[in-house]
Image (cartoon, rainbow, N blue to C red):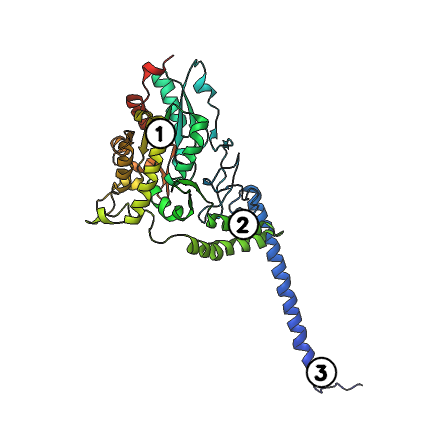
């Protein structure tokens, strides 16, 4: 009968056992990493296909939006672009011509018209609007056709984040091309900030000091280039990680390096300090200079001041008091009014009209508390108020009826 061997393993055998366990553990861990990576990869591709909730295809990102004349311009059709740190962009189903004017189907509004008055609209995203039938120019033309029997051919040159510093070279470009009968320009509360913090250092001036263009934003350039680099990764998991790095590391650094911190957006709007008339002198000077140059260009073209209308729309905070019972001030709207009326232009502030109509429920005018833009209800109400003002003060039925 053989005897059992109770002698301990040799040191070499003992050393190999923990190594095998370590290798098995590493192999299992790697397998789990691969499995979970595959699951996340599949999940990211699925959300891209069915959504996307977080765009990783980035198919439309390029640098075609850049302009040294207007800072940024729309693509002909769908566009996903980066400006001021917006990392995802928004895809709109709309079209623009080579001059940046919306292309819409207005055949129903012009049907049966032997003649029509042309109106050129300037503005930012509030003027750009949404789809073809949810823009201020469309609603205005519809009002004149149905309520006044007047046909208007509208030219919507509004585009997101445009402001007076951009309107200046834009007006110089478009007026000789479009040659409108009337001009409507919507100047927003955000324009005070945009002109000073975003565009002031990008304005190009000629030897006479005239604004001849607003260069492309280095922040937007960094964002678009960053997204194009993200798109080069084959795996969506790598794109996801690279886009997060761009969002939370590279872009904040680019914004800090290129954007002025001397003025905070809307801080001037909610300011009710006794000395507000003496505050923000640099921003006021920049805004006033741009307004004066813009209105001068419009005056030279129109000659008759009643052919130009400056409009101003309220934000929710202009209509709804805060916890202290205060609404936003009129710092911006009063500067717009003064610049426009100095050239004998028409001026319409829709705040009172919308407050009267919506009273204690102004929230329904806007998408949500985190989005300053009008809802479809708000856009139509604002457009209707503008159209009524234009009908009473600007476009006379006797001059344009069939």
Residue at left offset 44%, top offset 18%:
110
Query: How far is mark 2 from mark 3, CA to CA?
Result: 57 Å
- Give SS at disc 3: helix
Residue that label 2 marks: 225
Q: Quadrant of the N terminus?
A: bottom right
Q: Is residue 281 above or below residue 253?
A: above
Describe the element under mark 2 as helix, strand or loop: helix
Tell me if 8 is positioned left or right of 245 in this view.
right
Q: At 33% across and 45% down in the image, what residue appears? A: 286
Query: Mark 2 or mark 3: which comes first in sequence?
Result: 3
- Left or right placement of residue 332 versus residue 242 in this view: left
Residue at 50% of width from left, 39% of height from top? 91
First reached walking from the N terminus: tag 1 or tag 3: 3
Q: Is residue 129 visible?
A: no
Q: Nearer the viewer, mark 1 or mark 3?
A: 1
Residue annotated with mark 1: 300
The x and y percentages for residue 122 are 39, 33
Q: Are marks 2 and 3 in contact (CB under 8 Å)?
A: no
Q: Which mark is residue 12?
A: 3
303 vs 234, nearest the viewer: 303
Local packing at callout 1 (Cα closer than 10 Å; few below 14, some 14-19, many 20+) is: few
Q: Residues within 10 Å of mark 2 (few under 14, many from 20)?
A: some
Find the distance from the CA under tag 1 to the CA under tag 2: 40 Å
Relative vertical location of residue 110 with respect to residue 325 in this rendering, above or below: above
Residue with the most extreme left position: 274
Q: Are marks 1 and 3 in contact (CB under 8 Å)?
A: no
- Give SS at disc 1: helix
Q: Are marks 1 and 2 in contact (CB under 8 Å)?
A: no
Please name whichever residue, 288 or 274, is drawn nearer the observer in this view of the structure.
Answer: 288
């Amino acid at each position: 009968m053989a005897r059992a061997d109770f002698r301990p393993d040799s040191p070499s055998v003992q050393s190999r056992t923990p190594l095998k366990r370590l290798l098995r553990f590493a192999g299992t861990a790697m397998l789990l990493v691969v499995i979970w990576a595959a699951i996340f990869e599949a999940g990211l591709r699925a959300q891209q296909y069915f959504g996307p909730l977080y765009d990783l295809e980035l198919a439309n990102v390029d640098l075609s939006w850049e302009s040294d004349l207007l800072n940024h311009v729309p693509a002909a059709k769908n566009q996903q672009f980066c400006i001021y740190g917006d990392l995802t962009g928004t895809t709109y189903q709309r079209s623009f011509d080579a001059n940046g004017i919306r292309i819409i189907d207005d055949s129903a509004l012009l049907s049966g018209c032997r003649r029509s008055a042309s109106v050129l609209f300037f503005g930012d995203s509030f003027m750009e609007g949404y789809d073809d039938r949810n823009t201020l120019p469309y609603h205005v033309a519809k009002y004149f056709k149905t309520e006044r029997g007047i046909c208007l051919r509208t030219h919507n040159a509004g585009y997101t984040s445009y402001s007076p510093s951009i309107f200046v070279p834009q007006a110089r470009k478009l007026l000789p091309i479009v040659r409108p009968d009337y001009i409507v320009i919507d100047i927003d509360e955000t324009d005070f900030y945009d002109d000073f913090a975003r565009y002031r250092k990008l304005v190009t001036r000629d030897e006479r000091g005239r604004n001849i263009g607003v260069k492309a934003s280095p922040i937007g350039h960094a964002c678009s280039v960053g997204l194009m680099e993200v798109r080069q990764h084959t795996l969506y998991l790598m794109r996801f990680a690279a886009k997060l790095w761009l969002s939370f590391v590279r872009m904040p650094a680019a914004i800090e390096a290129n954007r002025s911190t001397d003025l905070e957006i809307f801080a001037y709007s909610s300011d009710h300090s006794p000395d507000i008339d003496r505050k923000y002198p640099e921003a006021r000077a920049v805004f006033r200079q741009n307004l004066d140059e813009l209105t001068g260009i419009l005056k030279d073209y129109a000659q008759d001041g009643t052919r130009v209308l400056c409009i101003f729309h309220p934000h929710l905070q202009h209509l709804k008091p805060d916890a202290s019972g205060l609404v936003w001030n009129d710092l911006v709207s009063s500067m717009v009014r003064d610049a426009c009326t100095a050239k004998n232009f028409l001026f319409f502030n829709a705040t009172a009209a919308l407050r009267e109509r919506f009273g204690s429920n102004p929230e329904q005018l806007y998408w949500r508390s985190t989005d300053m833009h009008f809802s479809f209800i708000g856009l139509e109400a604002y457009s209707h108020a503008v159209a009524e003002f234009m009908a009473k003060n600007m476009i006379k039925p006797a001059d344009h009826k069939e």
